[in-house]
Amino acid sequence: MELTNCLTTYINMTDQDYKVIGAMRTYGGSFVKALATCAAHADASNLAKIKATWPDYWQEYIVMAEQDEKRGVHDN
């Protein structure tokens, strides 16, 4: 399933959330990619739990998503 297809259901996600999940799927190792998949399927409550449980990962991929945006890179 494409990232955009599974994320469109969760309107509580911010633009940044979408971009962070995309960066996690693009640049992450197997664990981070699995977190991205979980985040993409999470409701607002579970997404908050993911962010709270792995804040270092989330922050790391916020930075990557921002760098991608500055370079004009967009995930699918």
Image (cartoon, rainbow, N blue to C red):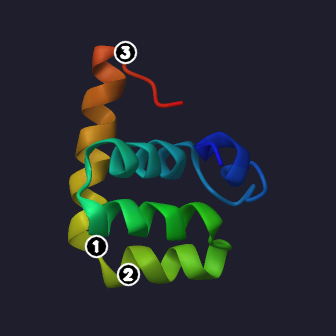
The amino acid marked with disc number 2 is Ala
* Relative side of 41 to 66, left or right: right
Q: Quadrant of the C terminus?
A: top right
Residues at circles 2 and 1 in contact by the CB criterion of under 8 Å: yes
Mark-to-mark CA distance, 1 and 3: 25 Å
Between the C-alphas of marks 2 and 3, the distance is 29 Å
Per the image, the residue denoted by label 1 is 55
Compared with 49, 4 (above or below) is above
Q: Residues within 10 Å of mark 1 (few under 14, many from 20)?
A: few
Q: Are marks 1 and 3 in contact (CB under 8 Å)?
A: no
Q: Depth check: 27 or 1 in front?
A: 1
Residue that appears at 25% across and 65% down = 57
The amino acid on which the numbered mark 1 sits, given as a three-letter code, is: Pro
In the image as oriented, which residue stretches furthest toward the top?
72
What crowding class fits label 3: few (fewer than 14 Cα within 10 Å), some (14-19), or many (20 or more)? few
User: Residue 68 shows which numbered tag?
Assistant: none
Question: Going 44% across and 77% down the picture, which residue do you hit?
Answer: 50
The numbered mark, 1 or 3, whose residue comes first in the sequence reads 1
Q: Is residue 67 above or below residue 35?
A: above
Q: Which residue is mark 2?
A: 52
Helix, strand or loop at mark 3: loop
Instruction: Report which residue position mark 3 lands on.
Output: 72
Q: Position of residue 40 (x, y in %)?
A: 58, 60
